Image (cartoon, helix red, strand yellow):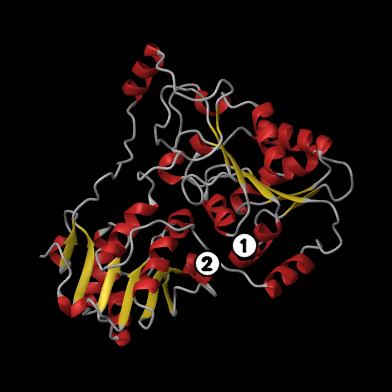
């Protein structure tokens, strides 16, 4: 194992990048992919990704080829498929053993990724943890109760708002940039970037009957796959959406997956006027259609979620109540971007990084409807 790349891999012709498995994480890898393309402009760069994320990469300028795999495909079958690509080098963005084993089965001569137990043997170059990296520590119930009892307050404004991401090297995108830098790419951050075409936008607008809307279009995303500890209460979403519409007539597009259909229906029913005030799109859009429609939104009011990252990477400002997670580590866009509004309460136990709150959900209950409405109106 070496800490610096040998000269034989400084000019690879064919690079395989093993992508991450979750939507938000995938978006946060785009700065590293762009830096990799910048470093190797003539190389063929292929991205290995789960089927569910394949369409995210359509038209992306950093990628020449997308190779996807189904949930039931094991590491051996994926590895044997990759052999046909005759790759010189593989860069593993996830820290999982599977990512390293796939490239080993593929016979790729140079395999690079972060050093982790149970997979180092399958790598030819292991990368030490980045200076400045911050590990997400899941708090125990006892730790949460101790923090609450001590009433340790967070340094936020009086109404619990964090107006922008603090410029920090802790953000997750730096983990991926650090890996690209091991190959000589620049480690300097870039804004996450995704691509949709005008034709895709027009097709999505036509399919969902949005072509004749003349009011500003705002997006609403009340779900979050990680768990309820990341979801601002639905009643607050509804109250905020109604108040925003009272003050700035708009059309809301309610997004979400199949699990969010009920949430979106409740939002649609709670905002009955004027006509076309809410379009319930939960469970109805493909990933490309979701991207096209997020692109036309003037802003997105959302939980910390995959669509939050997608919207920011497409240029839409986002307004986000943060609960169990940290905007400094996984906030949208480039850390420090002033166009986003990230809100959190002064709950001393947040971020806990838990899926479900073991006490009283104070981190998100402490974010008021009024503060969210004001944040939406600021960026509208």
Upstream in sequence: badge 2 or badge 1: 2
Quadrant (top left/top right/bottom left/bottom right) for the N terminus: bottom left
Q: Residue at x 44, y 37 (%)?
A: 325
Dot 1, how many residues are within 10 Å of its Cα: few (below 14), some (14-19), or many (20+)?
Answer: many
**Vertical order, 339 against 214 (above or below):** above
Q: Is residue 243 left or right of residue 334?
A: right
Counting from the top left corner in percent of width and height, residue 240 is at 71, 34
Quadrant (top left/top right/bottom left/bottom right) for the C terminus: top right
Q: Is residue 304 left or right of residue 15?
A: right
Q: Residue at x 67, y 53 (%)?
A: 282
Considering the numbered disc 1 on the image, is that residue within a helix, a strand or a loop?
helix
User: Extreme right residue here?
Assistant: 274
Q: Which residue is mark 2?
A: 56
Q: Which residue is mark 1?
A: 291
Considering the numbered disc 2 on the image, is that residue within a helix, a strand or a loop?
helix
Q: Quadrant of residue 15?
A: bottom left
Q: Is residue 132 left or right of residue 27?
A: left
**Vertical order, 341 against 43 (above or below):** above
Q: Quadrant of residue 99?
A: bottom left
Counting from the top left corner in percent of width and height, residue 156 is at 50, 25
Q: Is residue 54 left or right of residue 44?
A: right
Residue 300 visible in the displayed image: yes
Q: Quadrant of residue 243?
A: top right
Counting from the top left corner in percent of width and height, residue 92 is at 29, 65
Q: Residue at x 42, y 22 (%)?
A: 348
Q: Residue at x 39, y 46 (%)?
A: 171
Q: Nearer the viewer, residue 189 or 180?
A: 189
User: Extreme left residue here?
Assistant: 1
Find out whether the residues at labels 2 and 1 contact each other: C-beta distance under 8 Å. yes
């Amino acid at each position: 194992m070496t800490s610096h790349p040998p000269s034989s891999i400084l000019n690879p012709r064919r690079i395989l990048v093993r992508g991450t498995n979750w939507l938000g994480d995938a978006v946060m890898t785009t700065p590293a992919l762009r830096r990799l393309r910048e470093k190797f402009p003539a190389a063929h760069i292929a991205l290995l990704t789960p089927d569910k994320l394949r369409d995210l990469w359509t038209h992306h300028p950093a990628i020449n080829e997308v190779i996807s795999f189904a949930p039931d495909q094991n590491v051996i079958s994926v590895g044997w498929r990759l052999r046909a690509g005759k790759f010189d080098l593989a860069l593993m963005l996830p820290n999982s053993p599977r990512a390293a084993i796939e490239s080993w089965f593929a016979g790729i001569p140079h395999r690079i990724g972060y050093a982790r137990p149970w997979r180092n043997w399958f790598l030819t170059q292991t990368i030490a943890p980045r200076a400045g990296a911050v590990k997400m520590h899941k708090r125990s119930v006892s730790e949460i109760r101790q923090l609450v009892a001590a009433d340790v307050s967070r340094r936020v404004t009086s109404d619990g708002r964090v107006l922008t991401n603090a410029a920090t090297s802790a953000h997750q995108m730096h983990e991926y940039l650090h890996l690209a830098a091991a190959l000589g790419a620049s480690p300097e951050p870039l804004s996450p970037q995704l691509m949709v075409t005008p034709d895709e936008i027009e097709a999505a607008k036509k399919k969902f009957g949005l072509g004749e809307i003349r009011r500003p279009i705002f997006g609403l995303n009340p779900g979050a796959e990680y768990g309820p500890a990341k979801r601002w209460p639905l009643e607050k979403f509804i109250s905020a959406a109604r108040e925003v519409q009272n003050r700035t007539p708009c059309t809301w597009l309610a997004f979400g997956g199949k699990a969010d259909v009920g949430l979106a229906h409740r939002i649609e029913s709670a905002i009955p006027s004027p006509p076309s005030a809410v379009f319930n799109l939960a469970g109805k859009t493909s990933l490309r259609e979701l991207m096209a429609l997020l692109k036309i939104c003037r802003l997105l009011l959302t939980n910390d979620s995959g669509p939050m990252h997608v919207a920011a990477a497409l240029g839409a400002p986002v307004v986000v109540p943060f609960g169990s997670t940290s905007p400094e580590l996984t906030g949208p866009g480039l850390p420090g971007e002033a166009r986003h509004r990230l809100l959190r309460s002064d709950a001393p136990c947040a971020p806990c990084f838990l899926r479900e709150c073991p006490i009283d959900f104070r981190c998100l209950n402490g974010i008021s409807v009024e503060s969210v409405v004001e944040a939406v109106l600021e960026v509208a």
